[in-house]
Amino acid sequence: MKKLRLPRIFRNRIFVFTVTVLLVVCATVIIVSYSVFSNYFEKSLIRSTESSLRLVSDNIDSHLANVYRLVRFCRGNPSVADYIDSNPEPGSVKSVATYDRIAEEYGNNSSSSYIPRMAVVTDKHFLQIVNATYSSTVDLSRDLPRCDFFAKLIEADDYDFSTGFIKDPFYKNGVRVLPIVRPITYRFNSRTGGFLFMEVTPELFTDAFSRYSLEEDSHVYLNLPGHSYLFDGRVLTEVEAFTVKDARKNAALMDDTIVEKVTDFRGINTIMVSIPLDMPDCTISCSVSLTQLHTKQLFMWITILSVALAITAFGFLLMRRRLRQEKEKNDLEYKMLQSQINPHFIYNTLNSIKWMATVQGSEGIAEMTTALAKLLKSLSKGSSLNVPIREELSLLKDYCTIQSYRYGGTITVDIRTDDPSIEDCSIVKFTLQPLVENAIFHGIEPKGAGHIDVHLYREEGMIRIDVSDDGVGMSEEKAAAILTNAGEARSDFFRELGVYNVNRRLLFEYGEPAGITIDSTECKGTTMTVRIPAKQ
């Protein structure tokens, strides 16, 4: 007879279920991993850019602090205040002394190289410290107030850099400078008596930018109110300001760092990191390298897909294992429900019937024949794996009847049930016969005679069935070998269906802690215990 195969519809259901679960798991892993890794890589690049840009801003702010210190000196020094009050003629002692004091302070300032022109101006005269290449013969007290930017800057409450870099109005070659104009009051009242004019060169910023290491597709900017300048590696070139599309919160290390998704002057969408300078409404910005971001994202996708493939492979291995287990379970059902009666057993039974027919009346023959017929009928009918315990006990009694006559009454069997409701619960078919058979062949037969006790009761929410004999017993090694199929003799009644396979069937059907345990003492007897869930 051919072995029973796992039904195709069942295999298809396992396959569909496994694939569905794998798709859901893989989709979840991909979505979650993409969100986590993408956010991590993006934030990592943002913070790396921020850290480098912070060094640049610190360098610029250090030079700006020197510029502001020079401005504060000119606006608050008593010598300069006396010059404003007295408005002396050029070449006078006071004029020369004031100039020397300003020049001394200018020379001691470590950022003076970025200030090509500085002048203290009254309504009639001025004192100017100027780089030789920027020198001119203009009258600052007359011409400076006429400049377009003058009125706006001198009336501002604070430094105003909204003019951006302009062409130096007092230098014929048109060098671009950032103008600073601040009022100077009289010494003994708050009225404006003069002003300070200062020019700052772009090199104050470009020297700091040149030390900043940039990726090819990353750009650094100086942002003044109304102006945006791109550093191209040498100079600052004014470009169209970038358009902010979305602000990124909690992406930076410092609270004052601004992170935004923008469209730059080239129309490219990127992430811009901006750090404020010690200049009102002024920042420096750097775009995050998209090449680095895409490289990290490629690595991220490779990692995610590798994990997804690993999960898929693991899932298919589990599916194959499940199919193998189901096939083994089905094979066990086949062995149980479709196994054929051992011809040797039939021969022995028929010989016993013949012997009884010869030496005694028909009563025993009828009983033994009836028991055998019931067993054969149970083997041939139906394919249900589970039966009520009541039916299992009925089959067991028929089997014991046959064995009792076969051994001439030397073997007795007692079946006890503590709770009648136990018999309504289900059990895997032909669970008890192999255990009783084992007790007869390996326990009592070597002894010559004996008793078997089958006891059913409830224990800790499960049904426990003890099959005990007073036979020769066995060693622990032998008991362990029976449960591992290493030392169990084949069944006399069921072909290839012994204690080992019964135990496997119970584990397949119910899982742990169901199954069989063996407690045996040599020369005293053996108890095989079956534990199953209490199910109707």
Image (spheres, rainbow, N blue to C red):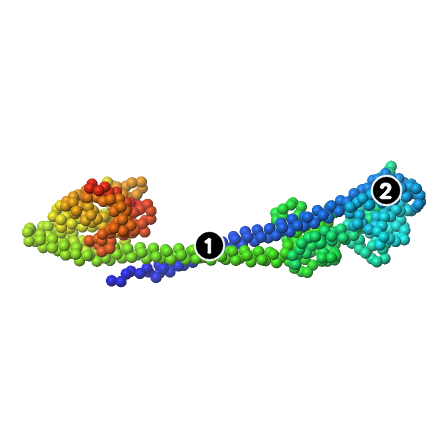
Comparing 189 with 205, the one in front is: 205
**Residue for point 68% across, 48% down:** 55
Q: Residue furthest top?
A: 188
Quarter where residue 210 is shown: bottom right
Label 1 or label 2, whichever lies nearer to me, is 2
**Residue 187 at what x, y percent from top left?**
86, 38
* 8 left or right, relative to 525: right
Q: Is residue 83 above or below residue 15?
A: above
Q: Which residue is mark 2?
A: 101
**Residue for point 67% across, 46% down:** 256
Amino acid at dot 1: Val
Q: Residues within 10 Å of mark 1 (few under 14, many from 20)?
A: some
Amino acid at dot 2: Arg
Q: Is residue 11 above or below residue 509?
A: below
* 369 left or right, relative to 125: left
Q: Which residue is mark 1?
A: 25
The secondary element bearing badge 2 is classed as helix
Callout 1–callout 2 Cβ contact below 8 Å: no
**Residue 196 at what x, y percent from top left?**
84, 46
Whether residue 30 can be seen here? yes
The secondary element bearing badge 1 is classed as helix
**Residue 451 at what x, y percent from top left?**
17, 43
Where, quadrant-wise, is the N terminus in this rendering? bottom left
**Residue for point 24% across, 44% down:** 475
**Residue for point 71% across, 50% down:** 283
Quarter where residue 102 is shown: top right
**Residue 212 at what x, y percent from top left?**
68, 53
Quarter where residue 171 is shown: bottom right
Q: Earlier in the sequence, mark 1 or mark 2?
A: 1
Residue 271 is marked as none
